[in-house]
Image: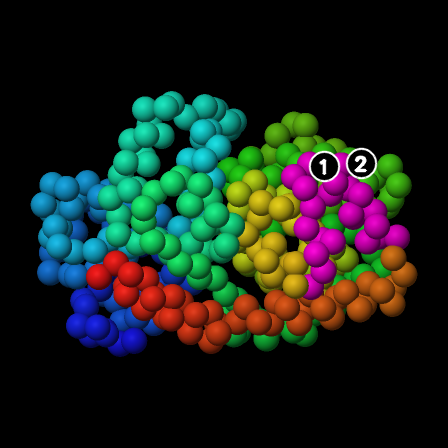
Amino acid sequence: MDKQSNNKKILFLYTGKHPVHMAFAKEIGADIQKLSWKVPKGYDIYLSEGDYAKLSLLRATGSIPSKSKIIILFSDPRLFYLNSKQLFNEKKYNIKNNSKIKRLTAKFLLSKVDGVLCGSPLEQELFKKLGLRVPSKIIYPFISDKRLNTFKKIKPKLSSNNILFIGNGPDYYYKGIDLLIKTFKIIKNDFPKSKLYVLGEWKVKSEWKIKDVHFEGKKEDFTKYLEGCSLYLHMGRGEAFGVTIIEAMAAGMPAIVSNITGAKEVVKRADPRFIVDLNEGAAARQVKDYFSMNLASKEKLSKEFRKEAQKINEQAMLKLFKEQFKLLLGEIN
């Protein structure tokens, strides 16, 4: 699919400039610029990262052509929060209720887009729960070839009882940091030498500051953490996907995820037992089961998780994106 594919001129409007999304845009030959209230006319398709409200309003006011198509790529907390009737309050660092009027307005504006690309089957499930008559397709993010080759060489310390989590704030609720800490507290009762390493930018709450929980800050290279831990734990609440889960798996580290984490589809193929209900008790039981395995069993699991992660590579996922984008265009034109 090149720039003039299907004779459609495409503009990709980024909000977060995610490198995977930028690669998607280049793959379909889209022009690229930052989303703002001033969007150039002359395009057949406007593809955006998440912000459906702005584009819907721009088309309604004639700022972009009425005949143009709007496609939204979802890979963030928006759909989860729209379904949960809550919002993360960054100023107060807590969860607040989202008013009915705001939710109805958001759903109305979302109903005016022409197509949706969902970053995982979970994202599509959340979108379909809204009951909107808008076609959607599933795509997946990926690990770059360079990073994948780096992770291939890593050997996790499977004999340890150390746990790793990688992700950035501020939204601890969406990322499940509170559940991660609660799970670790339970695990410490049976595995007192266990340590939890949390990588990423976080405003650390006082109740999270417990023995052997290490908030390490943002790290460009987390090789030493992958080499020093035996398990990746991600208790996401509606996490669209979670590329760091796949990165850990690519390094041979088994990953336990909640059942509302997008990457569960990949985890399931390695071992369905590693998908747990969204509570600390269920997570702790699975962690304990894993820690209690002999080294040979852990090594076997490590190979399975590494194998499945290798499939989420750049070439395969770019091909999938192109195919799904083309199918979506067929439905909305």
| Residue occupying image coordinates x 52% and y 27% | 94
As helix, strand or loop, the secondary structure at mark 1 comes to helix
Judge by depth and name the residue closer to the eye, 156 or 241.
Answer: 241
- Do we see residue 215 in this rendering? no
Q: In the displayed structure, would residue 89 be above or below residue 155?
A: above
From what the image shows, is residue 269 above or below residue 165?
below
Disc 2 on helix, strand or loop? helix
Q: Which residue shows up at 44% across the image and 41% down it?
A: 129
Q: Amino acid at mark 2?
A: Ile
Q: Is residue 77 above or below residue 250?
A: above
Looking at the figure, which quarter contains the C terminus?
bottom left
In screen coordinates, is 93 left or right of 32? right
Residue to which mark 2 is pinned: 186
Q: Position of residue 176 (x, y in %)?
A: 60, 39
**Closer to the observer: label 2 or label 1?**
1
Colour setting: rainbow
Q: Is residue 237 magenta?
A: no
Q: Residue at x 19, y 40 (%)?
A: 57
Q: Are marks 2 and 1 in contact (CB under 8 Å)?
A: yes
Residue 108: % across, % down: 28, 36
Q: Could you tell me the amino acid type at mark 1? A: Glu
Dividing the image into 4 quarters, which one contains the N terminus?
Answer: bottom left
Picture disc at residue 310: none
Looking at marks 2 and 1 on the same chain, the residue that comes earlier in the sequence is marked by: 2
Q: Tag 2: Cα neighbours inside 10 Å, few (<14), some, or many (≥20)?
A: some
Magenta-tinted stretch: 270-292
Q: Is residue 3 left or right of residue 191?
A: left
Given residues 67 and 295, the one toward you in this image is 67
The percent coordinates of residue 12 (x first, y second) are 27, 59
| Principal secondary structure, stretch drawn in magenta | helix
Question: Which residue lies under the disc numbered 1?
Answer: 280
